[in-house]
Amino acid sequence: MRILICTGMFPPDIGGPATYSKTLADELPMRGIAVDVLSFGEVRHLPKIIRHGVYFFKALKRARNTDIVFAQDPVSVGVPAWCAAKLLGKKFALKIVGDYAWEQGIQRFGVRDMLDDFSQKRRGYGARVDMLKRVQTFIARRARAVIVPSAYLKRAVAAWGVPDGNIHVVYNGFEVAHFSSAGVAGKKSKKYTIVSAGRFVPWKGFAMLVEIMPQIRATFDAELVIVGDGPEKDRLAETVRALGLEEYVVFKGRLSHDAFLHVVADADVFALNTAYEGFSHQILEAMALGTPVVTTNACGNPELISSGKEGILASYNNKKEFTEAILSLLSDKALRNDVAVHAKQKAAQFSITRMVNGTLALLSRI
């Protein structure tokens, strides 16, 4: 079998899609599968629209000698990848890790609804958002198989009208052996570190984590380390300045995957205040590293964490719940250790081998 992976992100980019594509590119050849990767990073420097046209021609050229075109999103790379597969008569598979129309609507077009409400409405969000909804639905319905990383996302994609039998849950995988969590093992100094990471977009809720730092610091000498970048960066930095927290909130910017893992492994708590996660690779990584997680009870997160066992779940943007959860972990080493043990046990169920074999089985079937 020969597969062309069309992805929007690939290392040195960080994030779940980049890690997933790199993992397949490394693992599938060891199972006798020829893999080629076409990253959108090859054309991202070009003007909008032109970059998608160039990406299509690259996909058309690279897909000639493949059996399956496997796109990692339904719009940005999904549309040109499907067009290339259609013209060449190649089979088309699709991975969906989120609702592209909703994400763009929140960031650029004034959408205020959360994803569950957004998914139930076919139109009514303006011409551009409604068009994106139609496009992603069109592409998803034409895939021979749609792979999603959580049961929550399967329900979301089914709401687009994609047949249930075409949607397959294959959980993401992560394995770690060469990192250890200094935070859980014990502190060498009095300072505690809370880490958060992701793209600086409205639904990630970084501002709330900044806003609760004065309450955290009233009890502990703690700092908040934020890894990532994005359109909300300036607004977030202004919040830090307004609260006088410049010494205690550290922006790390974009890091390599290994550097990111080192930061998480050395943290006392990994906090993710997110309104939307289809399946968070970062939460899974923190669990595997043994760093206690505080995150929201939104979307796919409860599939990873039972609150109080593998981590602590709180309501999105709820300052009281997040503050109490973080303080409870920082103040109780036994609790941190207990959460770390259960988190590692749960994370071990999401192995790379299981993910790759599940993905390969579906691609082989089509």
Image: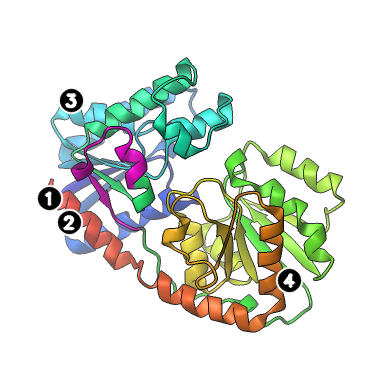
Question: Quarter of the image containing the C terminus?
Answer: top left
Give the labeled residue for mark 3. 87
2 or 3: mark nearer the eye: 2
Q: Which of the marked residues, 3 or 4, is nearer the chain's N terminus?
A: 3
Q: Residue at x 48, y 73 (%)?
A: 343
- Which mark, residue 192? 4
Tag 2: amino acid: Ala
Please tell me whether residue 159 belongs to the stretch shown in magenta: yes
- Which mark, residue 365? 1
Please tell me whether residue 359 belongs to the stretch shown in magenta: no
3 or 4: mark nearer the eye: 4
Alpha carbon separation for disc pair 2 and 4 = 44 Å
Residues at badges 3 and 4 in contact (C-beta under 8 Å)?
no
Alpha carbon separation for disc pair 4 and 1 = 49 Å
Tag 1: amino acid: Arg
Q: Which residues are magenta?
A: 154-171
Alpha carbon separation for disc pair 3 and 4 = 56 Å
Q: Residue at x 27, y 60 (%)?
A: 356
Q: Residues within 10 Å of mark 1 (few under 14, many from 20)?
A: few
Alpha carbon separation for disc pair 2 and 3 = 25 Å
- Which mark, residue 361? 2
Residue 120 visible here = yes
Residues at badges 2 and 4 in contact (C-beta under 8 Å)?
no
Q: Position of residue 305 (x, y in %)?
A: 47, 65
